[in-house]
Image (cartoon, helix red, strand yellow):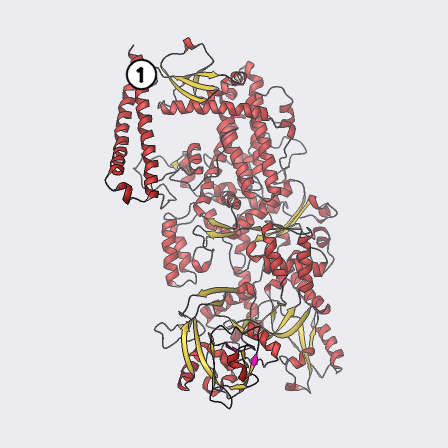
């Protein structure tokens, strides 16, 4: 087989090819693949060709001068007979019209009747991880789309019942934030100025106008989703499922309302989930900007101090003693309800059961003992307890039945517990004021830097506050156990398996899930608070003493019926108020695999397509989405929502940073597909919400990375390049330039097919061509080699797809096309196909048949990864439309290639490998003597093993090695003295007759110049190593490096001297 070529690196300065298309030659492509491209500007690789000497201007092709105009009416099939086969690959032209036709023809639509009752291994159902409707896809999402659509197209071509469901998520917090900012910017109004109903209308208007960018991107990426089943998590059908799920959880006693401590965003005035928390670690004293505050007047930039441990003293009741405690959040001392000491700490034994006095409110605060919370070796050994504002204190408060005193309002201001001195102050302004007040009272004992971790709201950037608020919770204990059991017993498979431990760690330690959010955009909680008119304000909805007044129902009529029964009052007396809160976005997302199928209704889709087959997503949302889907699926449908979870790696930029709008390193897939200028990249940064400092940094990075912008690559190159990255581990450091390199492979496919079609212009394929070919008895070794390599490639791609090894599948298909077909087979059949004599008729037919089979099979093999170019080229193959009833109108419905073991032939492959080693030696000889490519040479082969194989493929050696004649084991006396020799191995020596081929004097002169240049550095290094003090002063690692360098220089000098001696010998023979 041919020497394997790995996937290409970023393209270095490509040459101008025919038609103005810049592309790499085959050898350049291989060099790039092996990392041997242009090294002069290694530190700053360029997209374009850079500055070069001006070459004579070539006439620009008509296709370059005129922008492409799609001639195909929308939704119709391209007519290949009316579209010329372009000289080079132009992604815009190739990818035009196919997506519209595939969609209009209904090829993407799932068929419930076809799926019903099919065994699991003959169906493939998948839902898209619904991206947030607020945004647009970046290259990380594009990887998801590439992986998922590759699997979908592969299964569809295998004849499986296939459905790939698209959708978007309403993204409660993100969407509300975006629309609020827009309204404030455009109309200078807040959501409260509009009121809830009008604001929600504004959000729907925004969604209709701006929320479809994602669907455009998915279409351009070629995602074969069933658009007729596109879902949005706020659609009526999915909203019905949300209401039903909430009610069923409540009816089973799993859902309840309680006052608990959780993450609170003062900026959003809402509880948020763990997924929406970003953490920053402070090394010590740090000043930070707080957007919800007016600014610290004591700091020049208005920032507030964090990462400091402040110590203060509590006076002890009826005593001159004080008890010193420390905190990083001084403002929370307004809510202290105890001071804890260790029961075995002898310093405080005499204080057990006593009280301290709050310095501002005068409250008596008990001194308690708690061995679980207090470390008596840390600090003073006394700990202030604020149960309403700290997770550890919260648990302590429950253990000791302490008061839970909330000191903050929803927006982060001090409430009435601050008294007249602090009430109304924002929390960090109050922190400063309290420090000053304590100092005046003589109770401030000092401050010191303290490393700490701060939780930030990922949506608003605000510093989160632990707060006790009334929220709705779901008890997940039983659901979590079923979910872990499913993985442990093998019912649910997680790939890669290394993530199973993470799954167990989280679910085995599950906590009740807070599902309510204090927002307006989202699924409003289907719960109503009931009271009578006579009760008036004496009964409050947030008073936990009246928590039993909450009625959960599917609609208001049902709620009214339940409330009347609960209160025993008349309808006229009843006051029913719906909960204003909405559900956590992950609640509706967790229902997605079955809500999109129509659950809770017993629909045809639900019966045919649920459970789904696979959930493919990023590993970063394993807990927050995948686990919730599994738990909710098991609880609500009593079935796993899918049997396999495939987690792809996190996509980062080439420097390892997470792709984030806040870093300005996000690349839109359309910018790679269509190409874009540097200016458009910079303009996008200016139009975003980044701080000026970050914009400047991102712009500088763009200038370094994309000085000429991003060239047009097309969807196929993008998909194929992204799949190559999946061979890596947990994180993918994505270099966009490497993806661009696959544009060159697309060009190679294009040119190869166009070239090959000239070989089969008079060939007429049959429906059973491969079988006819293998049974014909007309195949040469080269033909059998190509078919055998084809079968091995097909087997490799199928096995890798089955095992979710997309990078390996991509490599197998890439190498098959480039190495086996282009490098070997196409080259060997040139003289065969060109010979139209009667004597060569059978050999020519076999070569044409093999080539057609190889091309057609590989296009089908590549189609799931590269849908557009494969459809375009497949439609152009001769014989299209003449291959009988089994022929499909599109490649995407054609049968996916399968390996026929009978057609594999290792003996033939080994034989061809031997021939390729001979060819490599022939080429090496020609190269070492600088023989011009067009000049044919006379070779002599000395073969001690397998000479029959060599004789059988003598013509192939001549073709690939550019030989005028090849003599195998000739008599020694017939070999001229004027030969160059290369010993390949113990059984093979290749010689070439150099007479008349080389100007020996010129070569000797060139080598003497090279010898002089090589001796200089060698002698300089020898002098350096012989200098006084070298042995004592130079570090050992540098001495070893110099020894190795000197050995290399000496070998180079020796090689040149031997070459000069050889040329002098040949020159003397010529003179004779």
Question: Where residue 755 sits in the image (x, y, percent)?
Answer: 49, 29
Q: Outermost residue, left direction?
A: 1028
Q: Magenta segment, principal secondary structure?
A: loop
Q: Which residue is drawn at 63% across and 33% down?
A: 899
User: Can I make out residue 414 in this image?
Assistant: no
Q: Which of 85 and 15 is in front in this view?
A: 15
Q: Is residue 142 rendered to the left or right of residue 1057?
A: right
Q: Is the residue 486 above or below the residue 795 in the image?
A: below
Q: Which residue is drawn at 38% across and 12% down?
A: 976
In magenta, the rendered stretch is 368-388
State the quadrant of the C terminus.
top left
Residue 370 covered by magenta stretch: yes
Question: Where residue 186 sits in the image (x, y, percent)?
Answer: 45, 68
Q: Is residue 180 rendered to the left or right of residue 792?
A: left
Q: Is the residue 439 above or below the residue 205 in the image?
A: below
Q: Outermost residue, front direction?
A: 346
Question: Where residue 225 sits in the image (x, y, percent)?
Answer: 61, 49
Q: Where, by quadrant of the figure, is residue 1061 drawn?
A: top left
Location of mark 1 (residue): 1065
Label 1 crowding class (10 Å Cα cut-off): few <14, some 14-19, many 20+? some
Question: Where residue 610 sits in the image (x, y, percent)?
Answer: 70, 53
Q: Nearer the viewer, residue 341 or 877?
A: 341
| SS type, badge 1 | helix
Residue 152 covered by magenta stretch: no
Q: Which residue is drawn at 53% across and 38% down?
A: 811
Q: Is the residue 409 above or below the residue 491 in the image?
A: below
User: Can I make out residue 876 in this image?
Assistant: yes
């Amino acid at each position: 087989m041919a020497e394997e070529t790995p996937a290409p690196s970023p393209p270095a300065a490509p040459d101008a090819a025919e038609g103005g298309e810049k592309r790499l030659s085959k050898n350049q492509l291989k060099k790039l693949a092996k990392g041997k491209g242009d090294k002069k500007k290694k530190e700053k690789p360029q997209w374009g060709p850079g500055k070069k000497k001006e070459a004579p201007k070539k006439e620009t092709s008509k296709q370059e001068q005129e922008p492409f105009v799609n001639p195909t009416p929308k939704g119709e099939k391209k007519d290949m007979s009316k579209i010329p086969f372009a000289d080079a690959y132009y992604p815009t032209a190739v990818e035009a019209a196919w997506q519209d036709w595939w969609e209009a023809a209904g090829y993407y639509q799932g068929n419930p009747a076809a799926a019903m009752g099919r065994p699991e291994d003959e169906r493939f159902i998948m839902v898209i991880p619904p991206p947030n409707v607020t945004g647009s896809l970046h290259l990380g999402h594009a990887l998801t789309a590439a992986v998922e659509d590759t699997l979908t197209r592969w299964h569809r071509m295998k004849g499986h019942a296939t459905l790939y469901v698209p959708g978007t998520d309403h993204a409660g917090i993100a969407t509300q934030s975006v629309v609020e900012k827009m309204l404030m910017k455009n109309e200078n109004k807040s959501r409260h100025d509009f009121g809830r109903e009008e604001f929600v209308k504004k959000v729907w208007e925004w969604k209709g106008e701006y929320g479809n960018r994602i669907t455009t991107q998915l279409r351009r990426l070629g995602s074969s989703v069933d658009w007729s089943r596109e879902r949005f998590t706020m659609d009526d059908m999915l909203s019905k499922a949300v209401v039903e799920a909430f009610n069923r959880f409540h009816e089973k006693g799993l859902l309840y309302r309680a006052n608990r401590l959780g993450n609170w965003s003062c900026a959003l005035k809402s509880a948020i989930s763990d997924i929406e928390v970003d953490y920053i670690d402070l090394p010590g004293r740090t000043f930070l900007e707080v957007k919800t505050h007016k600014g610290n007047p004591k700091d020049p930039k208005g920032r507030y101090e964090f990462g400091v441990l402040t110590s203060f003293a509590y006076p002890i009741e009826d005593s001159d003693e004080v008890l010193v405690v420390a905190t990083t959040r001084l403002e929370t001392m307004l809510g202290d309800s105890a001071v804890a000491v260790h029961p075995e700490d002898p310093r405080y034994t005499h204080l057990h059961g006593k009280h301290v006095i709050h310095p501002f409110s005068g409250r008596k605060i008990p001194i308690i003992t708690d061995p679980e919370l207090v470390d008596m070796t840390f600090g003073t050994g006394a700990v202030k307890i604020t149960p309403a504002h700290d997770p550890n204190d919260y648990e302590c408060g429950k253990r000791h039945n302490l008061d839970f005193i909330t000191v903050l309002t929803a927006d982060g201001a001090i409430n009435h517990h601050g008294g007249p001195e602090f009430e109304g102050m924002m929390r960090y302004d109050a922190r400063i004021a309290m420090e000053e007040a304590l100092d005046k009272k003589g109770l401030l004992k000092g401050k010191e830097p303290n490393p700490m971790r701060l939780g930030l709201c990922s949506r608003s950037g605000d510093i989160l506050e632990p707060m006790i608020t009334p929220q709705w919770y779901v008890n997940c204990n039983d659901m979590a156990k079923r979910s872990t059991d499913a993985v442990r017993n093998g019912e649910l498979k997680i790939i890669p398996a290394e993530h199973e431990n993470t799954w167990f760690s989280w679910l085995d330690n599950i906590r009740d899930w807070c599902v309510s959010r204090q927002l307006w955009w989202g699924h409003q909680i289907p719960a109503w608070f009931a009271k009578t008119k006579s009760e008036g304000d004496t009964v409050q909805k947030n008073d936990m003493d009246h928590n039993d007044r909450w009625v959960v129902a599917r609609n208001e009529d049902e709620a009214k019926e339940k409330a009347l029964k609960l209160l025993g009052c008349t309808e006229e007396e009843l006051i029913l108020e719906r909960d204003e809160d909405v559900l956590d976005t992950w609640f509706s997302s967790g229902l997605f695999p079955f809500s999109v199928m129509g659950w809770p209704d017993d629909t045809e889709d639900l019966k045919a397509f649920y459970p789904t087959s696979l959930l493919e997503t990023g590993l970063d949302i394993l807990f927050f989405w995948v686990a919730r889907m599994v738990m909710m699926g098991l609880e609500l449908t009593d079935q796993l929502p899918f049997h396999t979870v495939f987690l792809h790696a996190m996509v980062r930029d080439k420097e390892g940073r997470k792709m984030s709008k806040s870093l300005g390193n996000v690349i839109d897939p359309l910018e790679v597909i269509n190409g874009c200028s540097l200016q458009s990249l910079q303009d996008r940064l200016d139009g975003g919400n980044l701080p000026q400092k970050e914009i400047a940094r991102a712009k500088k990075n763009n200038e370094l990375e994309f000085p000429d912008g991003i060239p047009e690559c097309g969807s196929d190159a993008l998909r194929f390049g992204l799949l190559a990255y999946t061979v890596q581990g947990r994180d993918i450091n994505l270099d966009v330039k490497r993806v661009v390199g696959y544009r060159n492979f697309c060009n190679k496919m294009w040119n190869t097919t166009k070239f090959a079609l000239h070989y089969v212009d008079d060939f007429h394929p049959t429906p059973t061509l491969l079988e006819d070919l293998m049974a014909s008895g007309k195949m040469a070794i080269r033909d059998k080699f190509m078919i055998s390599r084809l079968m091995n490639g097909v087997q490799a791609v199928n096995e890798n797809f089955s095992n979710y090894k997309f990078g390996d599948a991509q490599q197998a298909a890439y190498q098959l096309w480039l190495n086996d077909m282009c490098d070997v087979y196409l080259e060997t059949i040139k003289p065969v196909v060109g010979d139209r004599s009667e004597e060569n008729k059978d050999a020519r037919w076999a070569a044409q048949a093999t080539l057609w089979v190889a091309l057609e099979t590989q296009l089908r093999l590549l189609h799931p990864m590269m849908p557009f170019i494969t459809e375009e080229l497949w439609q152009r193959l001769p014989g299209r439309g003449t291959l009988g009833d089994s022929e499909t109108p599109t490649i995407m419905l054609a049968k996916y290639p399968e390996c026929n073991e009978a057609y594999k032939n290792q003996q033939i492959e080994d034989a061809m490998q031997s021939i390729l080693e001979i060819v490599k030696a022939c080429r090496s000889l020609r190269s070492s003597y600088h023989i011009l490519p067009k000049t044919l040479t006379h070779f002599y082969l000395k073969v001690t093993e397998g000479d029959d194989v060599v004789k059988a493929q003598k013509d192939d050696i001549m073709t690939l090695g550019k030989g005028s004649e090849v003599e195998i084991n000739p008599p020694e006396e017939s070999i001229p003295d004027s030969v160059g020799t290369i010993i390949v191995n113990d059984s093979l020596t290749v010689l070439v007759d150099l007479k008349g081929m080389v100007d020996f004097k010129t070569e000797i002169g060139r080598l003497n110049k090279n010898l002089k240049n090589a001796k200089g550095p060698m002698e300089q290094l020898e002098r350096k190593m012989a200098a006084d003090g070298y042995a004592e002063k130079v570090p050992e690692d540098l001495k070893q490096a110099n020894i190795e360098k000197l050995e290399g220089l000496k070998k180079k000098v020796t090689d040149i001297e031997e070459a000069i001696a050889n040329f002098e010998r040949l020159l003397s023979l010529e003179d004779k």
